[in-house]
Amino acid sequence: MVWLILVIVGFVGGTVGSLMGLGGGIIVVPSLLLLASLSLIDITPQVAVGSSLVIMIVTGFSATIAYVKQKKVDYKSGLLFFCASGPVRLLVLG
């Protein structure tokens, strides 16, 4: 039962968030915390944020694949942005 609730929240959050350009976090995290406060699921705020992050990664990856198939990706700009932000992320995470 809990997994079904989580799948529904993730699907709705990912779909609505990607359609509106908000990311799923603005829908998923509050929904999970609301369900936790109602004692329907046992989840901590840290797990809710982590779950939202996974949903946003999957949504972003699927959107990237769709844009590559439509040939709408500017690889030169993407490489430039990665070169500027990649090392910073490695410093923060490493």
Image: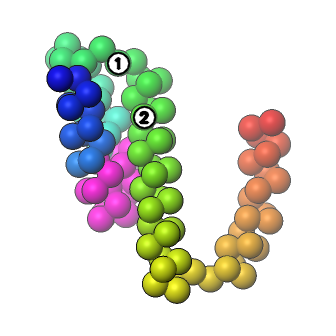
Q: Residue at x 39, y 18 (%)?
A: 44
Q: Give above or below for 89 relative to 39.
A: below
Colour scheme in the image? rainbow
Q: Position of residue 2 (x, y in %)?
A: 23, 23
Which callout, 1 or 2, points at the residue further toward the start of the chain? Answer: 1
Mark 2 nearby-residue class (10 Å; few <14, some 14–19, many ≥20): some
Q: Which residue is mark 2?
A: 51
Q: Position of residue 6 (x, y in %)?
A: 27, 32
Is 8 left or right of 24, judged from the image as shown? left
Name which quarter of the figure residue 23 lies in.
Answer: bottom left
Image quarter hosting the N terminus: top left
Asked if the residue under mark 2 is in contact with the one under mark 1, i.e. CB atoms within 8 Å, the reply is: yes
Q: Give above or below for 32 relative to 43.
A: below
Q: Position of residue 39 (x, y in %)?
A: 20, 13
What range is drawn magenta here?
13-26
Q: Residue at x 25, y 18 (%)?
A: 41
In what element is the residue under mark 2? helix
Is residue 15 located in the magenta-colored stretch of the structure?
yes
The type of residue carrying mark 1 is Ile
Using the image as rendered, state which of residue 6 and residue 87 is in the foreground. 6
Q: Is residue 34 visible?
A: no
Q: Residue at x 42, y 34 (%)?
A: 51
User: How many numbered badges does the structure rendering display?
Assistant: 2
Q: Which residue is mark 1?
A: 43
In what element is the residue under mark 1? loop
Name which quarter of the figure residue 83 lies in.
Answer: bottom right
Is residue 25 located in the magenta-colored stretch of the structure?
yes
Q: Main secondary structure of the magenta part?
A: helix
Is 10 left or right of 80, judged from the image as shown? left
